Amino acid sequence: MARKKILVTGGAGFIGGNFVQYMVNKYPHYDIFNLDLLTYAGDLTKHREIEKKDNYFFVKVDIADRESIMSLFEKEKFDYVAHFAAESHVDRSITEPGIFVQTNVLGTQVLLDAAKQINVTKFVHVSTDEVYGELDIDPTTFFTEETPLQPNSPYSASKASSDLLVRAYHETFGLPMNITRCSNNYGPFHFPEKLIPLTISRVLNDEKVPVYGDGKNIRDWLHVIDHCAAIDLVLHKGINGEVYNVGGHNERKNIEVVKTIISTLGKSEDLIEFVTDRLGHDKRYAIDPTKLEKLGWKPNYTFETGIAQTIDWYLNNKLWWEQIINGEYQNYFKKQYSLNK
Ligand code: NAD
Ligand code: TDX
């Protein structure tokens, strides 16, 4: 079988990193290129086990660096692009929106030009359910692929903008593409600024856990490996030009998630501290994944099995997250939260 070249952008981050490992191990006959700028969210220590494999390659580039991206695509002639690279944290988009437009919008447009220039077989754009805005607390409503885009944060607005550019390159230039819109991920190598790893790491250190507002906002959680399997399926079998929602019907209130972690770790709920709400905090997300299920996808984890696996992983991989929370992260944390401990 002919070797395929797959470019994974953002492969040093949380989901892209899991996807790189998944693909390197599953497809020894594919060459997997991890392209990443190594921002605060990217690290290569997670790839020690695959680094020596001869189907893994790394290149450090900014996706918005047009000259470097164009010449890399000309040189390598990738068959597929799985585009994960992004600024991904909603709170950071509220304090510093500019970098979200630079990376998520301009960076995506540079990649689209490069993919078009070499006629890639498929460009998979990894987007998010947040582009649809928010739902009411009504358990019978879900985001479908037809739900209008109504992003509320600078992060989700930048992702929706990139989705529209991908669509336009398909309509105007015939670029073969799919857009995926996944719900909240969790699992190994999740950067501890996000709710689940932040809670696990702080509870393990007996530190207060900041819960925004009343803790009743709802997120729909999916284990990262189930997301990786969805991207793999869409890359190979997705119908050209289609959008696919990804989610496993695991809706939980934030406070329920935090309490589950605290009780699994045998700690006290006194660690919970309700803090000032996030600006523009979306009330509820919930995905209808029917279209993707019809393509052949179903998740392997329930929230219960996934959260147990994830907590175990953080217990067994303290070195990874401690090196993060002991670094520049401390300044971020102090600025973002005004907790005493
Ligand atoms: P992350 O922040 O953990 O990782 C992002 C990666 O992109 C990092 O390795 C970073 O170094 C890299 N990067 C940032 N700017 C770059 C640039 N200019 N050039 C090259 N690389 C750059 O993010 P994540 O949580 O893994 O999310 C990955 C993708 O999945 C994003 O596009 C995000 O919108 C989407 N997504 C995330 C979730 C979630 O719950 N985390 C859910 C749905 C969709
Ligand atoms: O300290 C916190 N306290 C808190 O109550 C943090 C960091 C979050 N929260 C709340 C806000 C949200 O309702 O928890 C929920 C989850 O927050 P995040 O982990 O920041 O995720 P969210 O804002 O939902 O966005 C995530 O899912 C969709 C990813 O970060 C995005 O990249 C993805 O597109």
Image: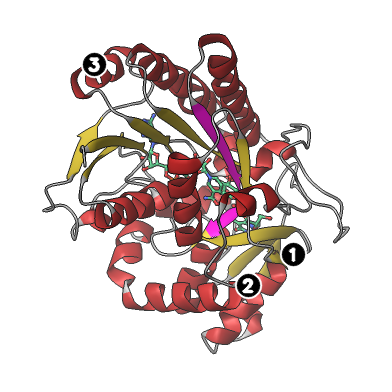
The residue at which mark 3 appears reads as 74
Secondary element type, mark 3: helix
- Give the distance between the C-alpha atoms of the residues marked 3 and 1, in whole angstroms: 49 Å
The residue drawn where x is 21% and y is 51% is 28
Q: Secondary structure at mark 1?
A: loop
Within 8 Å of ligand 2, the CB of disc 1?
yes
How crowded pointer 1 is (Cα within 10 Å; few <14, some 14-19, many 20+) is rated as: some
Mark 3: few, some, or many residues within 10 Å (few <14, many ≥20)? Answer: some
Res 213 visible: yes
Q: Earlier in the sequence, mark 3 or mark 2?
A: 3
Q: Are marks 1 and 2 in contact (CB under 8 Å)?
A: yes
- Of labels 1 and 2, earlier in sequence is 1
Task: Give left or right: position of 250 versus 36.
Answer: right
Foreground mark, 3 or 1? Answer: 3
Q: Position of residue 120 (x, y in %)?
A: 36, 23
Q: Position of residue 265 (x, y in %)?
A: 51, 85
- C-alpha distance separating marks 1 and 2: 9 Å
**What amino acid is at disc 3?**
Glu
Instruction: Determine if the magenta segment contains residue 75.
Output: no
Span shown in magenta: 177-185
Quadrant where ligand 1 appears = top left
Q: Which residue position is annotated with label 2? A: 258
Near-viewer residue (276 or 266): 266
Residue drawn at 18 percent across, 58 percent down: 48
Which residue is labeled 1 in the image?
215
Is the residue 53 above or below the residue 202 in the image?
above
Q: Are the two marked residues, 3 and 2, in contact with CB atoms closer than 8 angstroms?
A: no
